[in-house]
Amino acid sequence: CAHSYPSFRSNMTQKRRNCGRSKHGRGHVKFVRCTNCARCVPKDKAIKKFVIRNIVEAAAVRDIADASVYEVYPLPKLYVKLHYCVSCAIHSKVVRNRSKENRKIRVPPPRFPRRPDNPQGQRPGGVGGPRQTAAV
């Protein structure tokens, strides 16, 4: 940041108040590899995304339920923490650039509430759901 550089660099403008890092007082942090391009990125600078999804994709869930002996079987989930470098996060639209005023907004974006699952496990009108016929 501007306050940690020598005096001849102190009058330079800075884009962000934390200089794009969350290091604050630490001299050095470990590097992580970008999930997409394997670039070395400081751990505090990397854009982190925690993904929880089913190991089985949605199309195969019904097939497994039909072939299973058990009536109710909780499908295992896959927990992955993804680290992105800044350029890959922008390119894959994990983050996007913001205007000078909006960069100062530090509250995280609103999280969407999880939808409760239907007891049948299918969406209405989805695959295997009720069909809508066109009125002629």
Image (tube, rainbow, N blue to C red):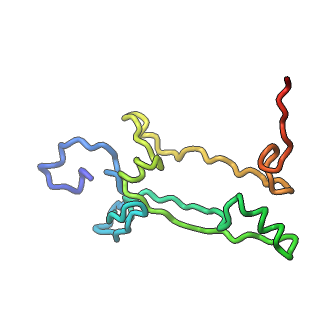
For the C terminus, give its image quadrant. top right
88 horizontally vs 73: left or right: left
Please identify the residue farthest to the left as the structure is shown. 8
Q: Does 11 sit left or right of 20 as displayed?
A: left
Residue beneath the point at 85% across and 26% down:
135
Q: Nearer the viewer, residue 1 or 116?
A: 116
Q: Which quadrant holds residue 58?
A: bottom right
Q: At 39% from the left edge and 63% from the top edge, which residue is drawn?
A: 34
113 versus 65 height, above or below: above
Q: Position of residue 22 (x, y in %)?
A: 38, 58
Within the image, what quadrant is residue 64 found in?
Answer: bottom right
Horizontal side of 46 relative to 77 (left or right) equals left
Residue that appears at 51% across and 45% down: 107
Q: How many marks?
A: 0
Which residue: 86% across, 75% down? Answer: 70
Is residue 81 positioned above or below 103 on the image? below
The percent position of residue 100, horizontal first and vertical second, equals 36, 35
Q: Nearer the viewer, residue 96 or 128?
A: 128
Does residue 26 appear left or right of residue 98 in this picture? Answer: left
Q: Position of residue 25 (x, y in %)?
A: 32, 63
- In the displayed structure, 79 sits above or below 84; it is below
Q: Nearer the viewer, residue 102 or 81?
A: 81
The quadrant holding residue 74 is bottom right
